[in-house]
Image (spheres, rainbow, N blue to C red):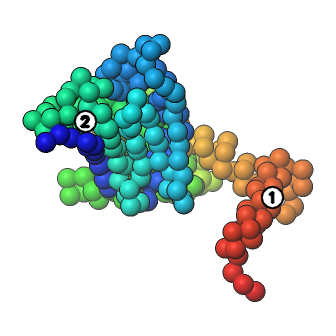
């Protein structure tokens, strides 16, 4: 008995399927050069010479709304696609084992199996994406949602909340203090940012804010003291949230939404152009509901 064709599949199921499609589209976008000869050598672990039949290319094939990524080596094919809306599937189809130096005999199935799964893992190793947004999404939810640490519950740091933005601004100042800060320092800096008199901030209110910053890992208390310091995580989160709100969300929404803003806003024009094209597309594919 001999092997005519054999397939090896590695399926990685995502615990957040809602983000999986975005993830796979990013994989495709960032890996259109997988079919180059130097990558072919890494993935299939076979030397590519001028005599190796090509072409060397990466193909993106769309069937309906599901896109698949194909990379070929001689008569063999590596395929990736997003399976059933929740899993990244990597498949190697071997049509000619001899092209990998393995005979077709059924006795060589263990060797082919090792080859197949090793190849699947190599392509995942070769692939690179510019943004690790899966981890970023987890961190975003971690910060902006409630958190429980050692049976202690910390309330959410909601993005865009005035108090949270003021806290982040203060953390960026406190990060520069070599000796850290105390709760009274937080009162003196936080209250004016919120338009409050510092005397209005009781110790209970300060303790609440310090507690949730600490449980979210943005500050840490120095052992044996009542002083706190801003953690590297706290600095990065505070800087990113503050900048995004000040430089992206507020200006962008100002251009997009209120009618009293200038009609010449570039972002508004771009959005209106997108809306027009979307309307035409919906009409063309007959997705527009009947009147």
Mark number displayed over residue 167: none
Residue sitting at the far bottom:
291
| Residue behind mark 2 | 116
Mark 1 and mark 2 residues within 8 Å of each other at the beta carbon: no
- Of 285 and 266, the residue lying toward us: 285
Instruction: Please provide percent x and percent y for residue 208.
Output: 38, 55
Q: Which residue is mark 1?
A: 272
The answer to whether residue 278 shows anywhere in this view is yes
Give left or right: position of 133 versus 11. right
Q: Nearer the viewer, mark 1 or mark 2?
A: 2
| 18 vs 135: above or below | below
Would you say residue 22 is visible in this rendering?
A: no
Q: Quadrant of the C terminus?
A: bottom right
Q: Position of residue 284 (x, y in %)?
A: 74, 68
Q: Residue at x 13, y 39 (%)?
A: 106
Return the x and y of residue 133 as percentages of the image width and height. 46, 43
**Callout 1 environment at 10 Å: few (<14), some (14 to 19), or many (20+)?**
few
> Percent from the top left, x then y, of residue 216?
35, 47
User: Residue sitting at 87 percent across and 61 percent down?
Assistant: 260
Residue at 52% in and 27% down: 55
Please name whichever residue, 3 or 267, is drawn nearer the observer in this view of the structure.
3
Using the numbered discs, state the Cα–Cα distance from disc 1 to disc 2 in whole angstroms: 49 Å
N-term-proximal mark, 1 vs 2: 2
Mark 2 residue crowding within 10 angstroms, few (<14) / some (14–19) / many (20+): many
Query: Secondary structure beneath disc 2?
Result: helix
């Amino acid at each position: 008995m001999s092997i005519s064709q054999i397939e090896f599949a590695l399926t990685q199921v995502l615990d957040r399927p809602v983000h999986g499609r975005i993830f796979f589209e990013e994989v495709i976008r960032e890996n259109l050069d997988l079919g180059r000869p130097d990558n072919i050598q890494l993935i299939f672990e076979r030397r590519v010479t001028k005599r190796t039949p090509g072409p060397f290319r990466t193909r993106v094939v769309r069937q309906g709304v599901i896109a698949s990524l194909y990379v070929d080596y001689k008569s063999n094919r590596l395929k990736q696609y997003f399976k059933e809306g929740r899993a990244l599937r990597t498949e190697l189809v071997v049509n000619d084992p001899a092209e990998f130096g393995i005979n077709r005999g059924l006795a060589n199935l263990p060797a082919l199996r090792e080859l197949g799964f090793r190849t699947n893992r190599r392509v995942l190793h070769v692939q690179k994406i510019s943004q690790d947004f899966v981890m970023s999404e987890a961190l975003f939810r971690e910060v902006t949602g409630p958190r429980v640490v050692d049976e202690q519950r910390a309330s959410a740091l909601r993005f865009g909340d005035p108090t949270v933005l003021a806290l982040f601004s203060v953390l960026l100042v406190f990060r520069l203090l070599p000796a850290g800060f105390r709760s009274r320092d937080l009162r003196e800096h936080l209250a004016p940012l919120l338009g409050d008199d510092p005397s209005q901030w009781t110790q209970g209110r300060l303790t609440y804010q310090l507690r949730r910053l600490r449980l979210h890992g943005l500050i840490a208390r120095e052992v044996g003291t009542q002083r706190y310091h801003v953690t590297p995580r706290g600095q990065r989160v505070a800087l990113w949230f503050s900048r995004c709100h000040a430089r992206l969300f507020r200006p962008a929404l100002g251009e997009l939404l209120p009618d009293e803003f200038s009609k010449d806003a570039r972002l508004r024009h771009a959005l209106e152009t997108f809306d027009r094209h979307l309307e035409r597309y919906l009409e063309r594919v007959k997705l527009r509901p009947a009147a």
